């Protein structure tokens, strides 16, 4: 999972791996699933960037869920509405998100909202 935040398809802030509990296929925490921060792989960042670049506007925040395919990462979901970003695992991403939201608000006030 990658969480791009900010300007014109900026690089993702972090990556998180979700794992289901033993004997479970769902990854939700209330079912025993866990989340851990992992090193952001370049191929994951590239796939996320390619998918987001196809959108008609640049989202301020997004989460791209990836699955490991036999030859390359596969997109499972692109979350643009209330994405959970696991900011507790990447505290530095919170400041980047705040800056991005302020930039978007200022652009809107100034009449040029280039992002959602």
Image (cartoon, grey):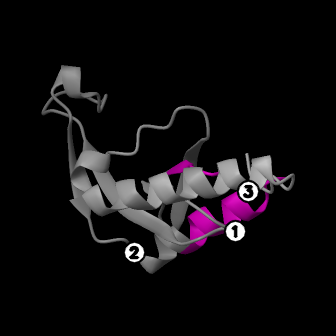
What kind of element bears circle 2? Answer: loop
Which residues lie in the magenta part?
46-64
What kind of element bears circle 1? Answer: loop
Tell me the distance, in whole angstroms, between the alpha carbons under discs 3 and 1: 6 Å
The reply to whether residue 68 is visible in this rendering is no
Measured along the vertical axis of the image, is residue 102 above or below residue 14? Answer: above
Which is nearer the eye, 29 or 72? 29
Query: Residue, x 69% and y 53% (percent of image)?
Result: 106
Query: Residue, x 20% and y 21% (percent of image)?
Result: 31
Query: Residue, x 29% and y 52% (percent of image)?
Result: 17
Side of 108 relative to 69 (left or right): right
Q: Which residue has dot 2 on it?
A: 41
Tell me the distance, in whole angstroms, between the alpha carbons under discs 1 and 2: 20 Å
Residue 63 in the image: state x and y as whole percent.
Answer: 51, 48
Mark 2: few/some/many CA within 10 Å (<14, 14-19, 20+): few
The reply to whether residue 109 is visible in this rendering is yes
Q: Which residue has dot 3 on it?
A: 58
Measured along the vertical axis of the image, is residue 44 above or below residue 111? Answer: below
Tell me the distance, in whole angstroms, between the alpha carbons under discs 3 and 2: 22 Å
Which is nearer the eye, 4 or 76? 4
Quick check: is 82 in the magenta stretch? no
Side of 58 relative to 72 (left or right): right
Which is nearer the eye, 46 or 87? 87
Q: Which residue has dot 1 on it?
A: 8
């Amino acid at each position: 999972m990658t969480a791009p935040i900010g300007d014109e398809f900026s690089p993702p802030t972090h990556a998180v791996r979700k794992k289901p509990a033993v004997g479970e296929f769902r990854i939700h925490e209330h079912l025993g699933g866990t989340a851990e921060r992992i090193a952001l792989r370049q191929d994951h960042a590239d796939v996320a960037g390619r998918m987001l670049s196809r959108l008609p506007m640049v989202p301020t925040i997004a989460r791209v869920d990836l699955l490991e395919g036999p030859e390359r990462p596969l997109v499972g979901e692109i979350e643009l509405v209330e994405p959970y970003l696991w900011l507790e695992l990447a505290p530095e991403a919170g400041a980047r998100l705040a800056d991005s939201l302020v930039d978007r608000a200022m652009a809107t006030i100034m009449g040029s909202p280039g992002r959602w």
